[in-house]
Amino acid sequence: SFQSFFASLGFNLPSDEEQVGMEDQIVIKFSHVVAENTPKGLAANRFANLVDEYTNHRVKIEVYPNQSLYSDHEEIDALQKNKVQMIAPTTSKVTNLSKKWLLLDLPYVFPTDAALQEALNGEVGEELLTSLNVTGIEGLAFWSNNYKQMTSNKPIRHPRDLSGKNFRIMPSVVLQSQFQHFGATTSELEFNDTFKSLEINKTDSQENTISNIYSKKLYEVQNYLTISDHGYLGYVVLMNKPFWDKLPPDIRKQIQRAMDDTLKWLWIKSNELNQEQLREIKQKSNIDIYQLSDEEKKKWMNEMTVIYPEFESMIGPDLMRKMEVIRE
Ligand code: LMR
């Protein structure tokens, strides 16, 4: 072979397999905003490894965490312009592309994990994903993080405690209304600006999953944490559509396979990680943690769901009905 011939001349050539990989290698840049030790960070790295394995090195996923390439408000635009080929924003951040996605931001919209999985893996999820195609984006999958909790510099035990507080929120009119309805004000801020704004008291409260509160040390600049599970935070994995459509079908198949394996793993991992990091927060800090009882959660749910009708026409009555059936 060429290899042994060149080797006999003293050259050290790569093996057949590596050579094929290098020549035809397809590079996919995957940009995200969170730390690596988070559900999304770990999933992105795992996915990259699986793609490498399943495509026999033909596809290389380059992962850029912590907004090292693009911030929240830049990454969708960068994806559409093919400056990166993959991103995985929180679903709240695509509500500007399609209002249907507001559905997932409704407070207490998923009464159980089973309802959550049924919605995302079924018709509801399918309809949401295809709604993005007209914007030049291919929706590949949903990755879960967890339910959101509230942090503040004053205690939050009842919905009335929200009054007068200023919440950092992601860009979503549902999230805005969820707090404003109870007399709070809201500030739309980038994820990686949240710590600073809480630290200098520009905002005094925020909602997020434990993994984000932990990895960005938000617990250090807040005095109270309420385990409310009042909303869902998950990701939609997106690819530039013209880029995706041009990939050879066998490559698309292997990417999809890596995606399916990653998300199955993540359903379990994301819960574990959030629980583990809550224990870490308890050990590392003096933040006052208040866990809503099931009864209290029901009260919160009854009060917060009053904002649903406001969004019925934006989300679409059809999708709302499908969700109601799942919630029953
Ligand atoms: C946030 O902005 O709080 C989250 O969307 C960050 C993330 O990607 O989990």
Image: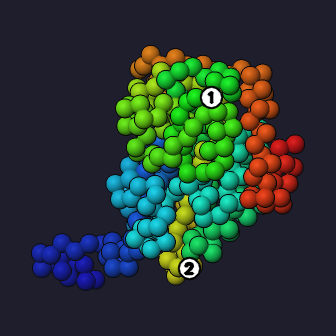
- The amino acid type found where label 1 is placed reads Ser
Image x and y of residue 152, in percent: 52, 27
Local crowd at mark 1 within 10 Å, few (<14), some, or many (≥20)?
some
Q: Secondary structure at mark 1?
A: loop
Whether 149 is drawn above or below 103: the answer is above
Observer-nearest of 134 and 85:
134
Q: Amino acid at mark 2?
A: Asp
Is residue 157 shown left or right of residue 262? right
Left or right side of 130 for 87: left
Choose top left, top right, bottom left or bottom right for residue 258.
Answer: bottom right
- Give the quarter of the figure containing the C terminus: top right
What percent of the width, then of the height, locates residue 2?
25, 83
For image coordinates 56% across by 55% down, the residue present is: 93
Q: Which residue is mark 2?
A: 245
> How does the figure colour the protein chain or chains?
rainbow
**Quarter of the image holding residue 321?**
bottom right
Which residue matches tag 1?
A: 163
Residue occupying image coordinates x 41% and y 27%: 221
Picture residue at 69% right of the left edge, 27% below the top: 159
In the structure shown, which secondary structural element does the residue marked by tag 2 occupy? helix
For label 1, being within 8 Å of ligand 1 is answered no
